[in-house]
Amino acid sequence: MKSISLALILLSFISGWSQTGTIQGKVSENGQNLPFINIYLKGTQNGTSTDKNGNYSIASLAPGNYVLIASAIGYEPYRKSFLIGRDESITLNIELTPSAEALDEMVVTGTLKAVSRLESAVPVEVYKPTFLKQNPTPSIFEALQNVNGVRPQINCNVCNTGDIHINGLEGPYTLVLIDGMPIVSGLGTVYGLSGIPNSLIEQIEIVKGPASTLYGSEAVGGLINIITKHAPNAPEFFADGYLTGWGEYNLDIGSKFEVGKKTDVLLGINYFNFDEIIDNNDDNFTDLTLQDRISIFQKWNFKRDNAKVFSLAGRFFYEDRWGGELQWTPEFRGGDDIYGESIYTRRWEVLGKYQLPIDEKVMLSVSYNDHDQNSVYGNVSYLANQRIGFGQMTWDKSIGNHDLLFGSAIRYNFYDDNTPATESADEVWIPSLFVQDELKLAEKHSLLGGIRYDYDNRHGNILTPRAAYKWRISDNDIFRINAGTGFRVVNLFTEDHAALTGARDVIISEELKPERSVNINLNYLKKIYMDNGTFVGIDASAFYTHFSNVILPDYDTDPNQIIYDNLDGKSVSKGVSANIDLVLPNGLKFLVGATWQDVSNTENGVTERQILTESITGTWNVSYTFRSLNLTVDYTGNLYGPMRLPTLGELDPRQEFSPTWSIQNIQFTYKGLDKFEFYGGIKNLLDWTPNRGNPFIIARANDPFDQNVQFDPQGNVVVTADNPYALTFDPSYVYGPNQGIRGFFGLRYTVF
């Protein structure tokens, strides 16, 4: 009898503790039910997804504390803590907020207006800070290596400076903006893209193809707009630091604070240091330039009546960059005993926006930057200063079916250096007028037209029209046709390392004319939402650009000269490009892109591939989160097809074309602690470097001052026992980074 009673008591005890709870509810956005939303409890295997009516339910929950997370492509993650007791049923209705990660994100670059990406008549690619975190880099310049059709090009093996190529076009054809202001160009591209903390970036917008109708000179091949955060949307405090196995250190710090009741301030500091001399390819030259860099950014947002815009921002940038022979020390700077390339860069920028206090939408935008560079390349000095001032007034007006934009701008350019190519300082004012009209033809059809007028006293009147047609086939299908023109005024950028570091003379054979381009672009954007919760986004384009008056440096006619002139013929860039965004119900995410392109120059009936231009490009970002472990894995990489390389003559033993090469990375991020993220991984998993298959990369690294090079009376290099390939010192044979495989580890701390 006692045993029966004991069994009943034990059974009752067990059944009492085995009673479980249930959480249920509905997920919606602005009252509209959302199907196929992922719901799970953090740190457990319990999860589900909403049905077609937006309902969800998770049962059999043991009593205790839980954290519920709801996530879906296109929405900000939802997080809620709750306590559940025995036999308790909790109803939790969830309202999701659309995320800027969606294809519906707001963009401004294509039309100078804030519109949904789906509504924009101009195709705009958008990349968020999440994208940058998948492969952390010390600068945006390097981060763009995982953007399809965009390639950071290193132009010098020794100092590692470079520019940005879009669809195979050289760096001078890419305009870089910060908050819509053209304060980064020419001399400052690689420096302007360094030192902006990722925590302060709202998004990066990229337009491929001419945009001179709105942005003027230099927006010939495309543009990149770095948009910083609005202070109220930034974290209260943010710190992100990491180091690599090569000894690189990078620290980003960001914060926001209030000054009075009507002013919000955004502050960001970036510091990067690399001070390890590494020579893995045994050429007695540094594989990676030593750098010591600091950048300070501040943005003030002033609260005004009727939410009128008023913001001011400024940035200061300083860098000490050095590369060269391993024996070099600062006392050898500028001498001809030990070769070194030493660059001191000081740069400051200011920019502001002010919406006029009237009923009409009228915006005044201003910016100014000063870039000072003190460089030596061996015993050749390069002292340069560039200043750019910009002011613009725009009027946004809707009348019936017409969405109009009127604008007037003035740009001040100053450039001076001590090279033979710059006889005197280049100083010019360029006033501009532009108008744009987007006409809604029907419910699904719209037509955009625009024209810009610029006056340059060196080249006279310049007109750049453009047109765009958009057909919204359905809510999830967009077809666009864009056609336009671009121009680039003559501003010969002479920090050309083949000229400064070799024995070549700079020759300008004629009065240079402005470069012109005509472009057509077809774009198709598709979103697919499957019943099982899978999302597929497709963004495909075909492009064709014809250039005239192209200014190209000719390295081939005379190995001792660089000859600048306008191409007597044509230059063509054509190709197709596609990005596929795939999200599976289990949380696995893919972003895969590929581009095929053909960039060529035709002169005197002879067509030749443009130098340092790849034929194929592939990029990928693969992410998966193990929910129970709070661990995210990111696998990123790129692939580049063959490109023609700058060899120094028929006897040069280095490969004329690069192989197909790839840089791949893996990263693990742990988010199990409140406010903290720990991340680490491996960069360049394949340990690829461009010296593979080549006897050397830097020509005559053993004689950087060409002291033992002999020339004939015509200036041609003579073959000798010491110089069997008839070469001069030249570090410009470079198409990829010299860094091999390396590990990295970092920590992020964020307070919202």
Image (tube, rainbow, N blue to C red):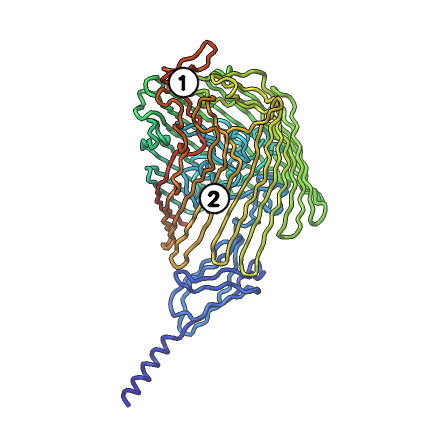
- What type is the residue that disc 2 sits on? Ala
Q: Is residue 116 left or right of residue 39?
A: right
Q: Nearer the viewer, residue 197 or 376?
A: 376
Which one is closest to the eye, mark 1 or mark 2? 1
Q: Is residue 168 left or right of residue 630?
A: right
Q: Nearer the viewer, residue 194 or 317?
A: 194
Residue pointed to by mark 2: 231
In the rendered view, tell whether residue 356 sits above or below residue 334: below
Q: Nearer the viewer, residue 690 or 651?
A: 651
Secondary structure state at the residue bearing disc 2: helix
Q: Are marks 1 and 2 in contact (CB under 8 Å)?
A: no
**Disc 2 crowd, CA 10 A, few/some/many (<14, 14-19, 20+):** many
Q: In the rendered image, which quarter is residue 214 located in? A: top right
Secondary structure state at the residue bearing disc 1: strand
- What type is the residue that disc 1 sits on? Val
Residue 425 in picture, x, y percent from top left: 51, 18
Residue pointed to by mark 1: 380
